[in-house]
Image: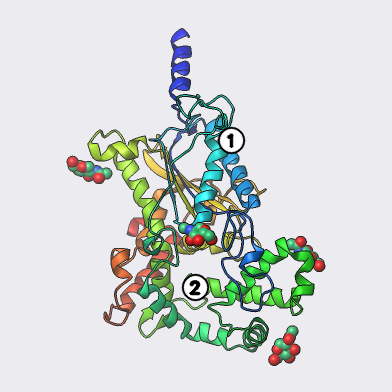
């Protein structure tokens, strides 16, 4: 008894956490992918009465995180602490540099979202951290506030977090996709042309499906911040036109993420659905699966290349709606982003990917959880993934591995982005057949075949 108490005391002192198990399944690793919180528009159309100087919060100007956005991430951080520190006792009670790694895109709002989130996870005056050890014991320093490292990489080459990173190949695939019958018919439909035509008349610029989002997004945010003056300052704004433009934009986003009704959607010998999912969600899904594979292969190993992952409990990506949507599209669960309407993930949406080791069959399992927006809880979505049991929160890691493999970029992404689509005449039939085979296998759960 005495020794048990001193072990607990020691754990509390060092901030180390214990383990969490559900039956025979032991949690060994958590990866988190979230979208930043509420922000100002990133740009707008020429005739918009609300230009950059209308946005004063969060440092001011385009694309900044608002106090509401900070609060949304503060709330999410609290929920994460409740789950993993208080309930599961899996994360340590205080910041441990070896156990968490945070990677943000190099954008103010994602970095500050991460900081706001970590503030409630590990920066509260609740006695879990120690002045003089975890932060300076001085007047002026908020008591309990522990700064936590947020890493980033250059935005132009961030193919994991930034779906607009420089990638001529991705642009080529999208241009090609637009010429497919499905997308072409959509663009040229009377409904779409009418809305784009009207917006072109009103916004002072030529509106097409590529820049439509700038208008719908600015109007979305103006309805949050300037709802009382929007309709008088912007005389052409109507709820109906906005709703129509927004619905068109939702469809465009499906196409941009490689989700078509035509399967396979082959243009000039290229399967634009598979190629798009490979070039967008492929890198981050494979990055997550790689982390889990290394975590598993390092279990019980003490070689130097295992030190980092053996200590690590939480890998965090602080990113964008586009990132989560590409990730979901890669798993063909894009409809989970926003239920029931579809569309891009909302502010502070978050995906939790938990890795478990089942000590009964000695096999790895994952659980996928979604936080739809501020105020919603954590919802298990594992069963939405094709091939996962529909009546269970857990699913064999092999299902995720197979998805990752199916949409793994053909070459290292920084290299693939600079290849020319038409220079290689890759056997399209092989790619499509493989995809059909994988989908069939997933649906029938015939994984033994692969
Ligand atoms: C941060 O915000 C300022 C003001 O909008 C902007 O000039 C700067 O480029 C932003 N930096 C990043 C990395 O987002
Ligand atoms: C904005 O105002 C309209 C009515 O003028 C209302 O229907 C709508 O719900 C309001 N939107 C928000 C975000 O408050
Ligand atoms: C670590 O290095 C050893 C060789 O020293 C190698 O066999 C093993 O696969 C490596 N593990 C990882 C996770 O890279
Ligand atoms: C609101 C609005 O201006 N609607 C117009 C959109 O375009 C069509 C066709 O050009 C017009 O008939 C609508 O009046």
Residue 324 in sight in this render: no
Residue 260: image x %, image y %? 50, 75
Q: Nearer the viewer, residue 358 or 421?
A: 421
Which element type, helix, strand or loop, lies under badge 2?
helix
Is the residue marked by circle 1 packed among few (<14), some (14-19), or many (20+) residues within 10 Å? some
Which element type, helix, strand or loop, lies under badge 1?
helix
Q: Nearer the viewer, residue 335 or 207?
A: 207
Residue 256 badge:
2
Residue 201 badge:
none
Residue 104: image x %, image y %? 45, 52
Q: Which residue is mark 1?
A: 82
Q: Is residue 259 above or below residue 183?
A: above
Mark toward the start of the polypeptide (2 vs 1): 1
Q: Along the horizontal axis of the image, is 73 left or right of 424?
A: right
Residue at x-position 41% and y-position 57%: 285
Residue at x-position 65% and y-position 73%: 246
Q: Nearer the viewer, residue 131 or 383?
A: 131
């Amino acid at each position: 008894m005495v020794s048990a108490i001193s072990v607990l005391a020691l754990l509390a002192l060092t901030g180390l956490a214990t383990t969490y198990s559900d039956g025979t399944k032991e949690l060994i690793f958590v990866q988190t992918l979230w979208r930043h919180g509420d922000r100002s528009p990133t740009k707008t159309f020429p005739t918009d009465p609300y230009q950059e100087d209308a946005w004063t919060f969060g440092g001011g100007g385009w694309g900044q995180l608002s106090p509401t956005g900070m609060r949304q991430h503060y709330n999410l951080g609290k929920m994460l602490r409740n789950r993993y520190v208080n309930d599961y006792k899996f994360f340590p009670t205080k910041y441990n540099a070896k156990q968490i790694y945070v990677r943000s895109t190099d954008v103010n709002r994602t970095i500050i979202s991460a900081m706001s989130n970590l503030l409630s996870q590990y920066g509260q005056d609740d006695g879990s951290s120690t002045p003089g050890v975890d932060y300076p014991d001085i007047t002026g320093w908020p008591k309990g506030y522990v700064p936590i490292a947020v890493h980033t990489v250059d935005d132009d080459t961030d193919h994991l977090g930034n779906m607009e990173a420089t990638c001529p190949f991705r642009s080529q695939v999208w241009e090609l996709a637009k010429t497919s019958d499905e997308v072409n018919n959509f663009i040229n439909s009377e409904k779409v042309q009418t809305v784009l035509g009207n917006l072109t008349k009103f916004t002072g610029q030529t509106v097409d499906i590529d820049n439509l989002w700038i208008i719908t997004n600015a109007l979305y945010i103006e309805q949050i911040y300037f709802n009382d003056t929007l309709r008088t300052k912007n005389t052409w704004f109507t709820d109906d036109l906005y709703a129509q433009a927004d619905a068109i934009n939702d469809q465009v986003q499906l196409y941009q993420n490689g989700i078509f009704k035509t399967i396979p959607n082959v243009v000039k010998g290229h399967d634009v659905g598979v190629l798009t999912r490979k070039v967008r969600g492929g890198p981050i899904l494979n990055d997550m699966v790689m982390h889990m594979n290394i975590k598993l292969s390092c279990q019980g190993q003490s070689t130097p290349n295992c030190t980092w992952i053996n200590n690590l409990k939480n890998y965090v990506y602080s990113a964008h709606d586009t990132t989560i949507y590409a990730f979901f599209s890669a798993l063909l669960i894009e409809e989970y982003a926003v239920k029931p309407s579809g569309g891009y993930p909302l502010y502070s949406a978050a995906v939790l990917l938990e890795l478990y080791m089942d000590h009964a069959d000695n096999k790895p399992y994952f659980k996928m959880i979604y936080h739809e927006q501020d105020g919603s809880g954590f919802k298990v979505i594992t069963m939405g993934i094709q091939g996962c049991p529909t009546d269970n929160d857990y699913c064999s890691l092999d299902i995720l591995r197979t998805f990752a493999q199916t949409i793994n970029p053909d070459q290292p992404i920084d290299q693939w982005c600079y290849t020319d689509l038409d220079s290689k005449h890759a056997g399209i039939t092989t790619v499509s057949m493989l995809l059909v085979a994988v989908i069939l296998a997933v649906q029938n759960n015939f994984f033994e075949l692969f």
